[in-house]
Image (cartoon, helix red, strand yellow):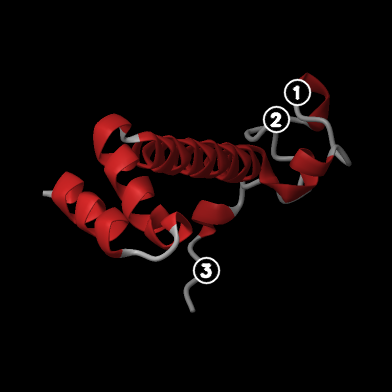
Amino acid sequence: MADLAGAECYSQADHPAECKPQGADYLECLDNRKEIKRAQTIADEFNRQQQHRAHELRKASDIASGGAITYLGLIQRGADDGGSGSGNGNGNGSSDSGGSSK
């Protein structure tokens, strides 16, 4: 049908340039270049957003697992931080189960 509309346009038009949109539509129907390009653009954007989400989740996970101060590198976690059960009174979570209720 697009071919008939294009043929009608060319037979009735004073200038062939008037039928350029119909010709472009016909060519798009034949090879789908615009559709393929649009699908690729959508897929690329989807992948970019997925990578961004994964990066943000990884970042949040790092912060949650090591704390913000550890994440920034201000305090190093490991054997030299006293551990969580040493009872040295530095507030490393050893007194959380002390029973303070609010």
Outermost residue to the right = 74
Mark 2 against mark 1, which lies toward the viewer? Answer: 1
- 11 is higher (above) or lower (below) than 36: below
Amino acid type at mark 2: Gly
Q: Position of residue 9 (x, y in %)?
A: 27, 59
Residue nearest the viewer, comparing 7 with 69: 7
Please count the marks in the image.
3
Mark 3, other Cα within 10 Å: few <14 / some 14–19 / many ≥20: few
Q: CA distance from mark 1 to mark 3?
A: 28 Å
Residue nearest the viewer, comparing 64 with 34: 34
Q: Which residue is mark 2?
A: 83
Please name the residue shown 47% across and 73% down the image.
101
* Mark toward the start of the polypeptide (2 vs 3): 2
Q: Which residue is mark 3?
A: 100
Please name the residue shown 31% across and 30% down the image.
31
Q: Position of residue 100 (x, y in %)?
A: 52, 68
Q: Secondary structure at mark 3?
A: loop
**Are the residues tagged 2 and 3 within 8 Å (C-beta)?**
no
Q: Secondary structure at mark 1?
A: loop
Identify the mark at residue 78; answer none if there is no mark. Answer: 1
Q: Is residue 3 left or right of residue 98?
A: left
Identify the mark at residue 52; answer none if there is no mark. Answer: none
Mark 2 against mark 3, which lies toward the viewer? Answer: 2
